[in-house]
Image (tube, rainbow, N blue to C red):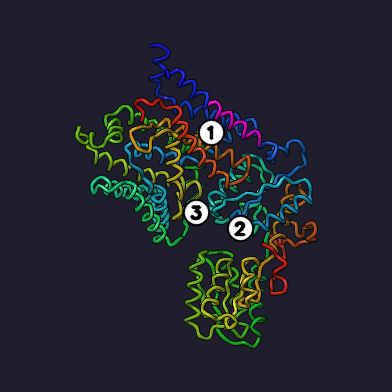
Amino acid sequence: MTFKERLRTFRWWHELGLVILIIGLLAVAGTLMPRFLDLKSQLLLSRHIWEMAILALAITLIIITGGIDLSVGAAMGLCAVAFGMTFQYTGSLVLSCVAAMLTGGLGGAVNGALISKIKVHPLIVTLATYAAFRGIAEGLSQGVSYSQFGEEFSQIARGKWFGVPIPAYLFLAMAVACAVFLSKTPTGRFIYAIGHNEKAARFSGIDVDRIKFWLYASSGMLAGLATLVYVSRFDTAKADAGTGFELEIITAVVVGGTSIFGGRGNIAGTVLGLLLIHETRLFVGRYWQMDELKSIIIGALLIASILLYRILSPKKGRE
Amino acid sequence: MTTITLMKQKLLILTLTVAAILAGCSGDKEANPDPIQGRDNTAKTVTVALLPKIKGIAYFSSCAEGAREAADELGNIELIYDGPTDGDPKKQAEMIESWTVDGVDVIAVSPNAPDVVANAMREARAEGVQVITWDADAAADTRTFFVNQATAQSIGVGMVNAMVNDLGPDTEGDVVIVSSDATSANQNSWIEVMKPAIENSNLNLATIKYPGENASQALADSQDVIKKYPNLKGLFGISSVSFPGAAEAVEQTGHSGKILVTGLSTPNEMKKFVHSGTVRSVVLWNTVDLGYLTIFVAEALATGKLREGATTFTAGRLGEKVIAGDNVLLGDILVFTKDNIDNYDF
């Protein structure tokens, strides 16, 4: 293969662009603020992103099918209330964890059923459940915040194994599993097929409805799992858990190169997108000490990533 | 156009973009010197992070003003003032964690939800950061001192006295308290003081409403009680949300001058009601002084001038302040009336 051909078939331009951006950002941050690159503090502050990172895996798969899930943040609120109320009545942390996971799975299954069986557009369905989940959570809990789950439970999010935060292991295992599932299994490839052309996928015998149902159901279950980490981190379960998560996660996934129209994207891109957003937020927060700057910069990143994609993607085969 | 030239163009644009970002960031460095970095050069500088419940509202901006005044006066303070713009206590916890990692000397927290920030505050203390609370308190093991703006006693009694004096001590009739959430610790401690004080007057406490921190609900609840109690003489709005709500309800139902509204809020929020006569007294503390005192306490703790167990503390222009247990007391409440409210701008 000549160099020219290699260049033409190189599939990782977007990921390469993200890596360059991240290195550039770290270089600037490290110059202006040498302690920014300190590994120990980076690991400690990484706890600000794990819940979003876990959810971003499910959202990546959903967006590759051409769908969307706006309800994950609200589902976390519902899971948190389920957790808190179960703890209040039973005093058992195990039961509370089960309750949160079940609630998340159930909420995701409702989304999945409405989308795959009744064939309503995912944007409409999850916009409706986004409002409904949060509303039910607030109604059930009456705004009460549950707390004092004990020192042991708070170690889930705050504890470390070999210097690395515990949620990191959880995320890495799931990310690898997701990446393998997406690129090596038939169902994983079907997910791309659905995003490329759903009708064609149906005609070629792919059980589109079953795949979609399970994707949204697992997104709900992951919301339950993310809630456990979240509740553990703040030692608080309240109906406002996960507020605004859906938009930040979708931003990370899109910055990571997954096409919002479906058919294209991968887990590596999402991980890089998450990393870029996380480091940017940390740097802006720690250097300028201005909370209001963070959301402006995230918005700018989203626009920049779309431009980056436009610049780097060869016209053929990608659009 | 061949693929190579196209690719070259793309790479060129990318390089320019990255260069622009780098230039943009380094260009700002002069204007925004890293506040914590400077600490290493002059060993005596104390870095204080002042964390409000919400950044950008009048109440906390006026506190920050007093904090800056104290920092200028002391001269050895690097002051960081930042907080969540949406009042999310979880963001407060994340900011405390960032500051801990960055090695600030003192973190002064006004916790919006003490449980949420408790672990972050304990971690900061374990890392050797001095942690204090101001404006609102948290669990005793999460901080060394609480800079307390005014005791529940002085606020509660102050509001009831204002109402009794403004109505005339001989007036008889019903009064209603419009509070915040039923779980708000500050408001509940004031109500505990207000109840016996109202009993000792000629007034009768008809009911207590809990609209939460919700302006339209405060308005609706106030309208309800105005309809329900024909002998209503006064409304207490004891949060900065319920006070304007209650005043608005009285004006909308045409009871201005007949039902008096008193309570706790910032002067700017209440000016128009004071000038229209619906409100005669607004009770608060001097928020500028609260920020000023907080920075003095922070500096004294970091330099070892103030230790646990002290009973008095001298804070610049405020003079000597009493320390009750682990509470540094700012002191008396301020009552704003038609005569002095225009002198305050926060």
Q: CA distance from mark 1 to mark 3?
A: 26 Å
Q: Is residue B20 magenta?
A: yes
* Kind of residue at badge 1: Gly
Residue A286: name its quadrant.
Answer: top right
Q: Which residue is mark 1?
A: A163
Could you tell whether B107 is left or right of B116 in the image?
A: right
Majority SS type along the magenta span: helix
Where does the image place residue B167, in percent across and percent down from the top left?
64, 83
For image coordinates 54% across by 25% down, the residue present is B15
Assess disc 2: are there few (<14), some (14-19) or many (≥20) residues with their C-alpha within 10 Å of its C-alpha.
few
Q: Which residue is mark 2?
A: B57
For image coordinates 47% across by 40% down, the residue present is A50
Please give the range of residues in magenta. B14-27
Where does the image place residue A219, in percent across and percent down from the top left?
35, 43
Is circle 1 on the same chain as circle 2? no
Judged by depth in the image, the label closer to the viewer, 3 or 2, is 2
Q: CA distance from mark 1 to mark 2?
A: 40 Å
Q: Quadrant of the C terminus of chain B?
A: bottom right
Could you tell whether B43 is left or right of A15 in the image?
A: right
Q: Secondary structure at mark 3?
A: loop
Q: Which residue is mark 3?
A: A148
| Chain-order first, disc 1 or disc 3 | 3
Q: CA distance from mark 3 to mark 2?
A: 30 Å
